[in-house]
Image: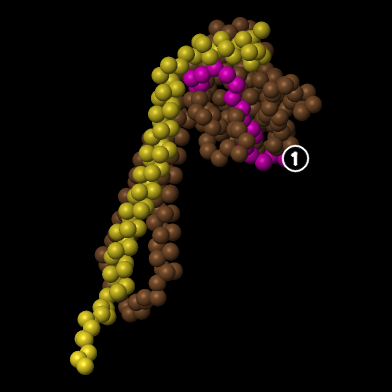
Chain colours: A yellow, B brown
Amino acid sequence: MASEVLAKPQMRGLLARRLRIHMVGAFLISLGVAALYKFGVAEPRKKAYADFYKNYSPEKDFEEMKKAGVFRSIK
Amino acid sequence: MATPAQLGLQNATSPIMEELIAFHDHALMIIFLISSLVLYIMSLMLTTKLTHTSTMNAQEIEMIWTILPAIILIMIALPSLRILYMTDEFIKPYLTLKAIGHQWYWSYEYSDYEDLAFDSYIMPTYFLEPGEFRLLEVDNRTTLPMEADIRMLVSSHDVLHSWAVPSLGVKTDAIPGRLNQITLASMRPGLFYGQCSEICGSNHSFMPIVLEFIYFQDFEVWAS
């Protein structure tokens, strides 16, 4: 019975190969985390401030607070 | 003021605080970037039996992990310095007032007006009206005009204190024998709370600050 000859497995450079693949993966993941924070938190926060001040009226806010009795210096 | 279990910064009331919040987001993004990279590398090291025990020449990687952190540090320093110089911009203040720290209350002197000075003690819990905040209210609030640059001179009568109002992005140490200057500006009317931020004795947690921002016509009426 002829025995099949298996292909020679890779014997060297295993760690180097693992590092090569995973270093690229690590940088991609960390950049992904940063992008997630930037576009998930930072940019929406800037937009929220811009939207708040777009139609904000300090006079209206002031009158509402005055009517609610918030201010002690104004009777 | 902060709400229960709040982790982040309070909402900004001054332009400087808006810039500080944006910078905090930028710095925290960089922190998450580096931390996730380090955590991933640590997990890689813990999940392999492969080793490399011979001496290595690591010239290329040494270059990378020197230059990359230097670039990251510059990316942090540039916006930081921009905001630092922004806080020191020359402005012509509408009003100057002094905040003096005592054990354990603040006193305010509006020297631009005659005879306007008062002490600001914490409002005891049993005197609070419904809707008022425990350990944050005071008997005499510091009334200020909104949409105006205000110069605060902060000092102390006895030990170190610190005059802080988070939503304005202000924290200035009150040092006996020294006048520290800070500029305030609020874009909105309302009440803004702060607390003493330098340990000053047994009642350090019980000397809050309340700023009441109103229109300057109403402020002139109040001040007179």
Number of other residues with Cα within 10 Å of mark 1, as a class: few under 14, some 14 to 19, many 20 or more: few
Find residue A30 and report its horizontal and vertical position in percent: 37, 52
Screen quadrant of the C terminus of chain A = top right
Q: Is residue B167 left or right of residue B58?
A: right
Amino acid identity at mark 1: Ser
Picture quadrant where residue B222 is located:
top right
* Chain of the residue displaying label 1: B
Q: Which residue carries the number 1 mark?
A: B202
Q: Is residue B113 visible?
A: no
Residue B99 sits above or below residue B81 on the image: above
Instruction: Please tell me whether residue A75 is drawn above or below residue B96 in the rendered image.
Output: above
Residue A67 visible to the viewer: yes
Residue at 41% from the left image edge and 23% from the top image edge: A51
Left or right, B83 with respect to B166, comes to left
Query: Would you say the magenta stretch is mainly helix, strand or loop?
Result: loop
Q: Is residue B196 magenta?
A: yes
The one nearer the camera, B122 or B43, is B43
User: What is the x, y in percent for residue B117?
Assistant: 67, 17
Q: Which residues are magenta?
A: B185-202
Residue B10 is left or right of residue A48, and the answer is right
The quadrant the N terminus of chain A occupies is: bottom left
